[in-house]
Amino acid sequence: MTGASASAGALTALRARWRRLAPGRWLVTGLPWLWLVVFFCLPFLFILKISLSEPALAQPPYLGWIRETADGLVSIVVNFGNYGLLWDDSLYASALLGSLKVASISTGLCLLIGYPMAYAIARAPSHLRMPLLMLVILPFWTSFLIRVYAWMGILNTNGILNNLLLWLGVIEQPLAIMHTPLAVYIGVTYAYLPFMVLPLYATLSRLDPVLLEAAADLGARPLRQFLTITWPQSVPGVIAGAMLVFIPVMGEFVIPDLLGGPDSLMLGKLMWTEFFNNRDWPVASALAAVLLVVLIVPFLLLRHYETRAALMEDAS
Amino acid sequence: MNNTVTNADQEPLVRIQNISKVFGSTYAVDNISLDIEEKAFFSLLGSSGCGKTTLLRMLAGFETPTEGRIYIDGQDVTDLPPYERQVNMMFQSYALFPHMTVADNIAYGLKQDRMARAQRDERVRDMLALVQIEKLGHRKPHQLSGGQRQRVALARALAKLPKILLLDEPLGALDRKLREQTQFELVNLQERLGITFIVVTHDQEEAMTMSSRIALMREGRIEQVDSPRRMYEFPLSRYAASFIGNVNLFEGTVSSQDGDQVRVDSEEAGGQLLVRHSQPMTVGMPVTVAVRPEKIRMAQAGDDLPNQMQGVIREIAYLGDESIYHVELASGKRVKYTQPNVQALAELPLTWGQTIALGWYADRCGLLAQ
């Protein structure tokens, strides 16, 4: 007995010492932190700094905060004017609204198309699941830009779609899809659909089909089975997929630029214009900072309530 | 427990008529006909792959029979989907809804029936009390132990007070102690509620303890349907005799019959065996004599045991409550013989290599057709 407890005590002491020293622990938690600091926090601080500077015709095209005047005085100039401009000029507000609109609608479209797709793959015979998933991922083998150009070829007035419909006699005049919001929705939904399908598949394939049998046994018809059993359990996948679509679409600029018209105003496109055409880095940076806040605040709120709900459930 | 009265002119609650189920080219269920009376505790017993679960799933409506009809309460339900049958099932994996609380799980079926809120809450409370988990209503399934989950699954399946409750290996996931205790609870529950229970199990002991009737299945067919007692004492086939409990089988041929006394020549037994058997037999017919190990006793001088033989003890299995002796006869046949360990240290401890005389009465063994 004593021998066993003595060795158990020694083991505990050893574990405690290991815990105090354990360099592995710091390495494991430290690496992601380092990554976040170097590739996210620092760049964001740069952008924040530029957004609070004054634009200038120089290289780089903004003035630093600390300036030395001719009489030897050092002054720190922080310029909130860029944010003021974003507030005052309705162009930016409508670009934000435009982005929100495109992002919400295309997230909805992706969900509408992606959910049945993911469900079908998850319920397919096991030997078909991998090939079907591969088909979802396959477009990534081609450059994003080329795929968007391909859509130009399809949607053009003189493109494949119009020619096909004319040939079939469905329409008499070519449809004007290219350079309209519709073209943007088609392009965005197409490009981001896999980001919706994959997390949904991951969630749906984990659901136990026996639960549906249990629901049927208790009197639930197929639609009720879906609404009360499948849907509630797939919500985490829906949220993950929606975020993976919504967030990048908010900043998307290639698709609205190539497929959209002059009226499809989006933040990403506007940022591009400010950076490269107007060379107004401070305003572009202010836009980037605002976009980040717009995206991150709802996310943090959601996390906060989720954690609280989980804590309450465990406490009960 | 054997209180089921078979009433010939009364329509059985469940009538299974020439049911077959084919998967690919194999018959999972092969032309089964079966009647189940109301308020029975009916077990479908068999080893894995015998078709018992398929039969249960056809009763629930998850599988459609390839051939045959199923009637419940006189109504043909063969083509009804599960959600239109007055039958509920307790699943082997319990299949509790993980995103709902225990109370919501139990209320699920009642909600589908659009039962009024107050009534529903009351029923849920009753069900929680019935399976003795009153305080767990607000928990989620992942916060429960295995035994508690089993109770929730039972309460959920009973909540709608169905005519028939189907149970797929209801005690399979419980440990031995809990299983024994729950067996009796299930029987009490069934008697109290008057619901017909149809249980699938591979555990013969479980079937024996709980059932009023057992259907023993083998390779998609029914081997025998009987009360547990008759199943044990009067098995109709070698398979039935050896599936339930231990048995010694002696092959032989009928040599003569005098009333209900049949004499069987058996080389394995090393002579003639006397069996009480009321059915007329043909002389020369190959038969098997079956005798349970506990029906055999050690022959003493002056005993009038008609079936006697001598053998050498080869193996002894001490089980605590009893011991099993493997006795080798002159023919090389090994006979299992059990003896309860009445005394802590037996007066005459039998040991390996000892020669003993065994015997049994003519009415303690059975005659099986080959």
Image (tube, coloured by chain):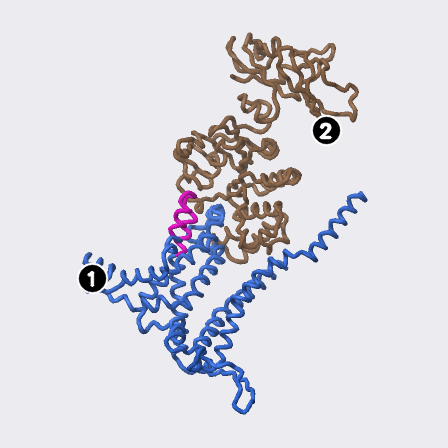
* Residue with the most extreme bottom position: A71
Q: What color is chain A drawn in?
A: blue
Nearer to us of marks 1 and 2 is 1
Crowding at mark 1 (Cα within 10 Å: few <14, some 14-19, many 20+): few
Q: What residue appears at the point 19 percent right and 57 percent down from the top-left corner?
A: A167
Give the residues drawn in magenta, as a range: A114-135
- Asked whether residue A301 is in view, the answer is no
The label shown at residue B307 is: none
Q: What residue appears at the point 70 percent right and 58 percent down from the top-left corner?
A: A20
Q: Where is residue A235 drawn, in percent x and y?
A: 48, 58
Q: Are labels 1 and 2 on one chain?
A: no
Chain identity for the colour brown used in the image = B
Q: Amino acid at mark 2?
A: Gly
Frontmost residue, B204 versus B176: B176
Frontmost residue, B263 versus B91: B91
Frontmost residue, B189 versus B254: B254
| Residue B189, quarter of the rendered image | top right
* Residue with the most extreme right position: A2
The label shown at residue A171 is: 1
Q: Chain of mark 1?
A: A
The label shown at residue B320 is: 2
Secondary element at tag 1: loop
